Image (cartoon, rainbow, N blue to C red):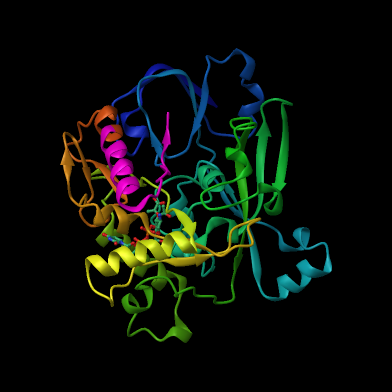
Amino acid sequence: MIKTAYYQDLTKMNTFGMKVKARCFMEYDSVADLVDIEFEELARPVLHIGGGSNLLFTDDFKGTVLHSKIDFIEMLDQEDCHSDRAERVEKSQETVLVSVGSGVIFDDFCDWAAKEGLWGVENLSYIPGEVGASAVQNIGAYGVEVKDVIRKVYCYDTVEEEFVNFDVEDCEYGYRDSVFKDPEIKGRYIVTHVVFALSRTPQPKLEYGNLKTVLEGLPEGSLTPVQIRKAIIKIRKEKLPEPSVMGSAGSFFKNPVISVEHFERIVAAAKAEYCQDYKVPHYIVECHGVTETMIKVPAAWMIEQCGWKGKRSGGAAVWEKQPLVIVNYTGEAYPEEIIGLEKRIIASVKTKFDVELHPEVEHI
Ligand code: EPU
């Protein structure tokens, strides 16, 4: 069924809580509904949203907002899916393929998987948003990106008006990036459902940050996905604003990747400012298509060094426990206040570190 509304209030459909309206809003709850939508006729521009957790509406939306309520979680018949040898080997390692509708809340899927004893998405627990958007954005946390468990992404092609599917290799996944974000095809494919490859074989990923410490006392050999999920939720709740209480879009900026030489300059300046033992947080990264070693420096650290942690500006503020997050502090913030803060943060990081921060949040 397709539900259509005009001048729809979007305040509850974007986690930042921007008080904006959409000229036309359409919500559908089955894959087949997409065939009935006359895409050529829709008021333009057309924007498909998920949980609205990675968007900053800068004004009322003049076109059509689409939203999926396709809501199923289904274990696939394993015999049907393992056609070649590699896949049969995988089957013996107890891979379980699960098909999930694009409108399912991603954390509901994580909860379901953990309770089924399936491994793969426990580290992605409590990330706001829906399954369709997760496959577009390649969400990630605590050492796991959703691409690591995606097998296939099923879509409706609004140009050719047909259903298509993408193997994970064809999705061109990168850090918070995919082929679906390519400006040339953005908006063309609507994700209907995603097939994930989860595992019955325990495969805890505990290397990131303080995850091991939080799990301390629990024997690593007998951990369950439910226990890891619980620990991840605890860490996220301690650091990130509770979405139901304080509006935000999670990390506002991407973590920048810089050259070794640039990083060394930053290290030298930090040592001069603090002490010779000062350690600048960083991760070495392999960049697709680049042979040179690159360094990822947490934007949170840079923003904190520029003195922004906990700073307020009108209705907007930099979250005091994780400065990568900009919050709608009063619940009444105007988009201009968020953008003003964003610009000032970018400018000060540029001045202090000569690093250009880029928003992770999409401005609409
Ligand atoms: N840091 C500070 N000051 C702070 C907080 C952090 O200096 O107040 C430094 C610390 O050195 C810390 C480092 O930043 O070790 C990294 O912090 P954190 O582990 O919180 O991760 P992040 O890089 O800031 C990324 C994701 C988050 C995800 C976490 C955990 C991006 C843009 N963000 O943040 O994703 O939850 O890792 O994996 O990559 C999101 O995308 O909305 C999101 C919350």
* Residue 270 vertical position relative to residue 93 in the rendered view, above or below: above
Look at the image and tell me whether residue 320 can be seen: yes
Residue at image location 29% in from the left, 65% down from the top: 270
Give the number of callouts: 0
Relative image position of residue 180 (x, y in whole percent): 61, 39
Relative image position of residue 258 (x, y in whole percent): 47, 56
Residue at image location 42% in from the left, 43% down from the top: 358
Relative image position of residue 75 (x, y in whole percent): 62, 57
For the C terminus, the image quarter is: top left
For the N terminus, the image quarter is: top right
Q: Nearer the viewer, residue 175 or 167?
A: 175
Question: In the displayed structure, does residue 87 sit left or right of residue 134?
Answer: right
* Residue 245 vertical position relative to residue 46 in the rendered view, above or below: below
Ligand 1 lies in quarter: bottom left
Look at the image and tell me whether residue 38 can be seen: no
Question: In the displayed structure, does residue 115 sit left or right of residue 306?
Answer: right
Q: Is residue 363 magenta?
A: yes
Residue span colored magenta: 340-364
